[in-house]
Image (cartoon, rainbow, N blue to C red):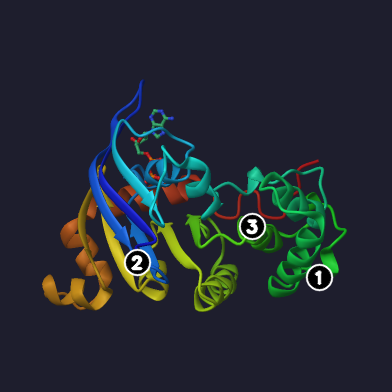
Amino acid sequence: MDALRITDLKKKYRKGPEALKGVDLTVKKGEFFGLLGPNGAGKSTLIHCVTGLAVPTSGEIKVFGKDSQKEYQAARQAVGLSPQEVMSLDWFLNVEETLDYHGGYYGMPRKQRQRRVDELLKSFSLEDKRKASVRALSGGMRRRLVIARALMHKPKMLILDEPTAGVDVELRLELWHYMKRVNKQGTTILLTTHYIEEAEQLASRVALINHGEIVDIGTVAELKKKHKKKTLEDVYLAVVGREELARTAKADAETDPGAGEGKGFG
Ligand code: ADP
């Protein structure tokens, strides 16, 4: 059974564009799958449809065989979402509570939650921050906590929405280490990114998305061979276009790298 099977997915926002124009996508069990595309391509919309945060206009999504709409509870249970915004954290909770409440939300009994919290604090190097307030954490710790929280209920698939957007190189490498390990331990990963290098480094298979359509899909080696290019960046330029790359770079510059990182909110 596939981890994720998306068939002819369309999403038109009521007051907005047709963000997805008939997407077909399959993620295999155990895969580290990269969804790569410029800002505005439809990556978040796709993830929101999979996780039930957005309602598809048409099409079908199956998560480990469960229909995301007809069997939404089972489908949601199978997925852990690490959202784009570190702001999704509750600034008034401490680290332990952040994880514990999330487990409670997923109906985990107390004993099981305690065990899982211990495991996650250990594997994300947050043990000595157990009682620390979220707002007192460094940017890197917050990002780690968001990923740990997504794994709290032991989902079979972890969805990472732009996990390293706007972080410095050092922190990016650190986060890659954690993501790789989660995948090695058996969790399927769907990663969205607009960083070509990130998809190249992490993903066993990559789908290129632009203007709401999957424009190509394959292993990095397959894509390079097919387009007769030496790097994934050259493939991206050929398939997605130079203008889109420039657009992404511009948006990055405007978002002020490091914004929200360790600056403190209150
Ligand atoms: P990405 O994640 O690749 O940057 P998004 O999925 O966020 O792309 O956006 C795809 C398109 O849908 C963009 O044109 C964006 O402006 C639009 N869009 C996203 N969310 C909404 C919304 N809630 N209402 C209207 N339009 C939206």
Q: Earlier in the sequence, mark 2 or mark 1?
A: 2
Name the foreground residue: 116 vs 131.
Answer: 116
Q: Which mark is residue 127?
A: 1
Residue at the right extreme of this rendering? 131
What kind of residue is marked 1? Answer: Glu
Residue at the spot of label 3: 153
- Residue at image position (42%, 68%) is 198
Type of amino acid at the residue the image marks with label 2: Lys
Dot 2 and dot 1 residues touching (CB under 8 Å): no
- SS type, badge 2: loop
Q: In the displayed structure, would residue 234 be above or below residue 20?
A: below
Question: Which one is closest to the eye, mark 2 or mark 1?
Answer: 2
The quadrant of the rendered image in which ligand 1 is seen is: top left
Is 102 or 132 nearer to us in this picture? 102
Q: Looking at the picture, how far across and down is residue 15, in whole percent?
A: 36, 21
Direction from residue 74 to residue 47 in the image, left or right: left
